[in-house]
Amino acid sequence: MALVRRSIPVFALLGAVSLSAAAGNLIINLLNSSKPPKKPKKQLDAEHAAEIFVSHESDPFFTALDRTYAHIIAFAWVDDSNIERWYNYLTTGTLAGENRLAHYPKIFFSKDAELNQETTTEGILRYVPSSREVIEILHFGKSLCGHDGIVHGGFLATILDEATAKTAIPHLPGKTGFTANLNINYRRPVPADRFYIAYSRLTKVEGRKAYTEGKIVSYPTFSESDFRESAENPKEFIAKVLERAVVHVEAIALFIAPRPPTAQ
């Protein structure tokens, strides 16, 4: 049988080469056009942050906390010399900003908490309060949702992880530790663009282990009688607010300090 040779037109070969080259150029252009994410602003929207918090700074719960607890500003040790590292933290970098965590939480520690001076691995001097109980006031913005208008469960787990860590880690050897277990129960959906209270307390310390529990509850509304009760018995009033508030998320957590290095 004679072999039949089929010739491919030159224009077809040129077309295939041109198409391949065009596809390659398109991919290269797409790769080159992908820009890295923009760095967060050094200053949050201060005006917006002030607006969402100013309405609560005169309510009975906030004033009772201010009288009974020590108010600690989160990340107070951050300044221009280490601002770049600030962006590497999840809640002060990626999750911070308008419609997210527009303002750093108002954090209240027990007034009898010991302030421990420490230097971080980055060489930053800071004071860490050893409090067995921590209360935070937070505002969850509209850009933190999983479902439309409902705050993402993973974000809520992050908030509880950090809240419980504040009561656990300062009581561990070396004032450092890591989350070993975080057990979350989601009781109710958490609507966005509202205020909430994150509460945590230390329950037990055993050597390198610290056990804590925490919850996220709705920020309540108050009556005229609440203002009187807050002024007369602030500590009892705080306990009453935390007890009657609607619970959205609960957690128990275990933190473990790293083993001390062994001698070689």
Image (spheres, rainbow, N blue to C red):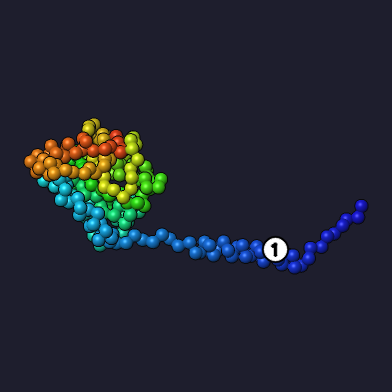
Residue 230 placement, left or right of 160: left
Task: Residue 120 in the image: state x and y as whole percent.
Answer: 25, 50
- Please name whichever residue, 238 or 83, is drawn nearer the observer in this view of the structure: 238
- Look at the numbered disc 1 and give the secondary structure of its residue: helix
From this viewpoint, which residue is outermost toward the left? Answer: 232
- Please name whichever residue, 224 or 132, is drawn nearer the observer in this view of the structure: 224
* Residue at x-position 22% and y-position 33%: 203
Label 1 environment density (alpha carbons within 10 Å; few <14, some 14–19, many ≥20): few
Residue type (three-letter) at the residue carrying disc 1: Ala
Task: Residue 67 in the image: state x and y as whole percent.
Answer: 11, 46
- The residue tagged 1 is 16
Q: Quadrant of the C terminus?
A: top left
- Please name whichever residue, 102 or 165, is drawn nearer the observer in this view of the structure: 102
Task: Residue 121 in the image: state x and y as whole percent.
Answer: 27, 51
Q: Is residue 3 above or below residue 211?
A: below
Specify the quadrant of the image occupied by residue 231: top left
Task: Residue 71 in the image: state x and y as whole percent.
Answer: 16, 48
Total numbered labels: 1
Residue 212 placement, left or right of 7: left
From this viewpoint, which residue is outermost toward the front? Answer: 224
* Residue at x-position 40% and y-position 47%: 148
Residue 158 seen anywhere in this rendered image of the structure: no
Residue 153 seen anywhere in this rendered image of the structure: yes
